[in-house]
Amino acid sequence: MRYTLGLHELGDGCHAYLQPDGGWGWSNAGLIVGDGASLLVDTLFDLKITQRMLDSMVSVTHGAPITTVVNTHANGDHCYGNELVIGANIIASKATAHEMSEVPPAMLAALNSAPGEIGDLFRHFFGEFDFEGINPVLPTTTFSGKYSCEVGGRAIELVEVGPAHTQGDTLVFVPDAKTVYTGDILFIGGTPVVWVGPLDNWIAACDLICASDVDHIVPGHGPLTDKAGVTAIRDYLSFVQSEATERYNGGMDAWDAARDIALNGFEKWGEFGRLAVNVDTVYRTLSAAHKSPDVVEQFRRMFALELKH
């Protein structure tokens, strides 16, 4: 299936909404259509692009309106458009619901419009999005661990695999269609960013996907993939964990370690500067005394790594 903007039918009433190129903020979503009702997996980063997505789904949802939304995690590119799905039951893990309130759209709007170096930095990453006037809409149903729901006669299984990428990442399984929507447990063609960790949890999530009876795998960013794509993400995470741990044990500073690690081919993936955050997360996992830099400095470091190449 071609990696193009818009709604793509996977079969068995499952669809993927894809947004190339899958870089910062350009996330995917999913639609599961049942008898007279549909479930939407994630909204998008701002109201304009979320509305564009919902408009593209009208031909499918006119007879099966969206009654349920699942937010796979708390990053804004997967939940800032919630207000446009009026009246829907919004489901997320308890950890996701808590984390959603920590980075409101107004914060990104302020960073994007900031003067000087900080504004320039954030516009480099997020300048294509409009965060003004977004009203955060939090989940109406929360869970921990596993949660089963039914939409239009179809069974949906939610499995919490975080903390990993964020505090409460969730996989969305559609057993009757052998389909999984992974949220940001998968970045295909792009580099995963481990904001929270530990990496072991993320590696375990990849193993769970590979052990599951699925034919269709919809990542949070990038083109549709298969289990080989999942294994590649797992390999990257294992590599970073090993390389960062070795340098931690040798007494190297986390930022020095990120600049020292040779990516051995993984630098071909987009956004490879995310290594800076990932190494820092390994250090934080290894030592409770490790202090991570603030979010502005994290973005400075990612930008600097990519500038170096």
Image (spheres, grey):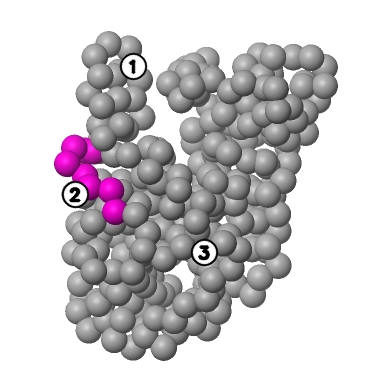
Asked if residue 306 shows in the view, the reply is no
Seen from the viewer's position, the closer of residues 261 and 98 is 98
Residue under circle 3?
A: 143
Instruction: Count residues near mark 2 (Cα–Cα under 10 Å), then give few for <14, some for 14-19, many for 20+.
Output: some
Q: Is residue 209 above or below residue 163?
A: below
Which kind of residue does numbered mark 2 sit on?
Lys
Helix, strand or loop status at disc 2: helix
**Which residue position holds label 1?**
118
Question: Is any atom of residue 205 visible in this view?
Answer: yes
Q: Quadrant of residue 269?
A: top right
Q: Earlier in the sequence, mark 3 or mark 1?
A: 1
In the picture, measured across the screen, residue 21 lies left or right of residue 208, that is left
Q: Residue at x 47, y 77 (%)?
A: 149
Q: Residues within 10 Å of mark 3 (few under 14, many from 20)?
A: some
Q: Describe the element under mark 3 as helix, strand or loop.
A: strand
Q: Which residue is found at the position 63% from the left and 26% from the top? A: 280
Mark with earlier residue (2, 3): 2
Q: For residue 81: magenta?
A: no
Give the residue at the far top of this rendering.
116
**Disc 3 vs disc 1: which is toward the camera?**
3
Specify whether 67 is left or right of 47. Answer: right
Q: Is residue 12 left or right of residue 277?
A: left
In the picture of the structure, the residue carrying the numbered disc 2 is: 48
Q: Residue at x 24, y 14 (%)?
A: 115
Q: CA distance from mark 2 to mark 1?
A: 25 Å
Q: Position of residue 123 (x, y in %)?
A: 29, 26
CA–CA distance in space, label 3 to label 1: 37 Å
Tell me the amino acid under the disc marked 3.
Answer: Phe
Identify which amino acid the numbered label 1 is placed on: Ile
Residue 41 pos. (x, y %): 40, 64
Residue range corresponding to the magenta coloring = 130-137
